[in-house]
Structures are given as structure tokens and as C-alpha cells.
């Protein structure tokens, strides 16, 4: 729950003996975000003076916990640090009792979220109820646009790589013109030559898939290591799932076999004398 509050909560660290006349039980306990604790060199048990402005830090608080916030892509570039207070303590600090901006309601297993939202909407006024999926979808519009942009880049890359792969396979098969001509002269059937070239293309595609998967994992590990250190977060920036690997391998095999089949078909349907350079 978050009472309506200014965007900034001012903290000032004090020594443990600065306020000897205040009993620890009378001082509210707060939880401090780990990055803020590192920046201010705070430890559990430290006493802070808190307020909503630099000239109004009249309240005391004790650091009861240091927590690591859940990684959130929407917050990664914001230079914000957070502390958590008990709701009554926060309301007293802000001078705004019985006021909240939003609060969360857990739904028991088996209860329909839509039914719970409808019940809340019909039993009170002055607020609106939303299910978590709607809130997540609304707050993720930026990432949805980025995802579509990446998908468009991926499609363009796949098309370009398919053309490039076809050109490579054509050049590679052209190098086998003499071999194909000799095999045709000694009576090797077109089907056998076509199968051999197709098998070679499949092996090349498999080898490329393995190398590409290894490079992808190495690049993902390097990306995560750099940006997690840069932003001081546990957020995963590059995630390679088994589904992605399976899709990539199948796509590589499909494109490789298609390119190999096209090149091999062109080769086996060329007259032997032309392949030999005499036609």
C-alpha cells in the first residue's frame, strides 16, 4: 500500500548513540533497498532521521532489514532508491492517514479473478479494480514495441541469411562440378549424387547450428555479466531458452537443406559434358 506521498523521502544517517533518550521500541522500523544501503553505508540496526524534505527530517527510524528488490525492467534506468515502512508509520510521516493510492488483493486458489474484480467494483465506489494481467499489459507497452521491433529485425536477418546461405551452397556445389561430372560418366545415378550433396548440406547446417548455439550462449553470458554489473542488478538481459535453441536449430536445418537441395538440383540436372567444361 502506498499512501499519497511526495516523490522523495529524505534520509539522514545518525550514529547509534545520537538519540539515547529514545527507546528502540518507539522508533519505527524500515527496510532499505540494498543499493541505497551500499551507497549510504547502512547496516541493520543503524538509526536514521527521515522526512519528506531536507528541512523536515524530524522523525527517526531504525534499519530493520536490507532487501534486494525484484528485478524490474521498467525501473532499471531510473536513479531511484526505495525504503519500505509500515503503513501506519508512513501515514504518520506524511500526515495523510487513511489515504492510499493503490493496494493489492490476493485471490484464493480456484477463485476467478474476473469474479473478484466484478465483486469489488460492485461493492464500493471511489476506486477501480484491475486484474494483474491488465496492469502488466498496460505498463509493458514500451517493451511490447521493442519486442515487435526486434521481431522485425529477426525476420529481415533470417531472410538475408537465407539468401546468403543459398549463395554459399551454390558456390560450394559449383566447386564439385568436376566430381559430379566424373560420377555421371561412370554411371552414378542423379539420385545418389543429389542425396550425397543434400547430406553434406545437412552436416554443414548441423555444424553451423552447434557453433551458433555456443556463440549465442557465450554472447548472452557476456551481455548479462556486463549489464548486471553496469546497472548493479540481478535482471537477466539476455535469456536463451530451450525453445529458442530448438527453433534456431530447426530453422538452420530447414534453410540449409533447402539451399542444399536447390544447389544440388541445379547440379544434377546439368549435362555431364557441360559440367566437364566441354559442352
Image (tube, helix red, strand yellow):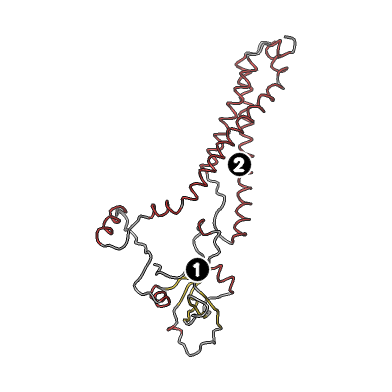
- Distance, label 1 to label 2, CA atoms, is 39 Å
Q: Position of 135 compared to 150: left or right? A: left
Q: Which mark is residue 82?
A: 1
Q: Which mark is residue 243?
A: none
Q: Position of 226 compared to 53: left or right? A: right
Above or below, comparing residue 88 to residue 255 in the picture: below
Q: Position of residue 44 (x, y in %)?
A: 52, 76
Q: Residue at x 47, y 74 (%)?
A: 30
Q: Residue at x 48, y 47 (%)?
A: 144
Q: Give the mark, 1 or 2, whose residue is nearer the N terminus.
A: 1
Above or below, comparing residue 244 to residue 229 in the picture: above
User: The N terminus appears in which quarter of the rendering?
Assistant: bottom left
Q: Nearer the viewer, mark 1 or mark 2?
A: 1
Q: Position of residue 167 (x, y in %)?
A: 66, 27
Q: Nearer the viewer, residue 126 or 222?
A: 126
Q: Nearer the viewer, residue 12 or 109?
A: 12
SS for callout 2: helix
Q: Position of 64 compared to 96: left or right? A: right
User: The C terminus appears in which quarter of the rendering?
Assistant: top right
Above or below, comparing residue 45 to residue 233 in the picture: below
Determine the image quadrant of residue 122: bottom left
Q: Position of residue 98 (x, y in %)?
A: 34, 72
**Residue under numbered circle 2:** 213
Q: Residue at x 63, y 35 (%)?
A: 208
Amino acid at each position: 500500500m502506498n499512501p499519497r506521498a511526495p516523490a522523495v523521502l529524505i534520509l539522514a544517517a545518525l550514529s547509534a548513540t545520537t538519540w539515547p533518550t529514545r527507546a528502540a521500541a518507539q522508533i519505527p522500523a524500515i527496510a532499505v533497498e540494498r543499493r541505497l544501503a551500499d551507497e549510504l553505508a547502512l547496516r541493520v540496526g543503524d538509526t536514521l532521521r527521515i522526512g519528506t524534505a531536507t528541512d523536515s527530517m524530524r522523525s527517526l527510524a531504525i534499519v530493520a532489514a536490507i532487501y534486494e528488490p525484484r528485478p524490474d525492467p521498467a525501473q532499471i534506468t531510473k536513479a531511484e532508491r526505495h525504503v519500505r515502512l509500515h503503513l501506519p508509520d508512513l501515514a504518520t510521516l506524511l500526515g495523510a492517514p487513511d489515504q492510499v493510492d493503490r493496494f493489492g488483493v490476493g485471490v484464493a486458489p480456484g477463485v476467478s479473478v474476473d469474479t473478484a474484480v466484478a465483486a469489488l467494483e460492485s461493492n464500493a465506489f471511489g476506486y477501480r479494480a484491475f486484474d494483474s494481467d491488465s496492469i502488466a499489459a498496460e505498463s509493458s507497452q514500451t517493451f511490447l514495441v521493442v519486442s515487435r521491433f526486434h521481431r522485425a529485425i529477426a525476420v529481415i536477418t533470417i531472410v538475408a541469411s537465407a539468401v546468403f546461405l543459398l549463395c554459399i551452397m551454390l558456390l560450394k556445389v559449383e566447386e564439385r562440378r568436376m566430381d559430379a561430372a566424373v560420377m555421371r560418366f561412370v554411371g552414378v545415378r542423379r539420385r545418389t549424387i543429389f542425396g550425397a550433396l543434400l547430406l553434406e548440406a545437412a552436416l554443414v547446417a548441423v555444424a553451423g547450428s552447434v557453433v551458433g548455439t555456443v556463440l549465442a550462449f557465450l554472447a548472452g553470458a557476456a551481455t548479462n555479466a556486463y549489464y548486471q554489473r553496469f546497472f548493479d542488478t540481478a535482471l537477466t538481459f539476455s535469456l536463451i531458452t530451450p525453445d529458442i535453441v530448438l527453433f534456431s536449430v530447426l530453422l538452420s536445418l530447414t534453410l540449409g537443406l533447402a539451399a542444399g537441395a536447390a544447389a544440388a538440383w541445379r547440379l544434377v540436372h546439368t549435362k555431364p559434358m557441360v559440367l566437364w567444361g566441354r559442352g
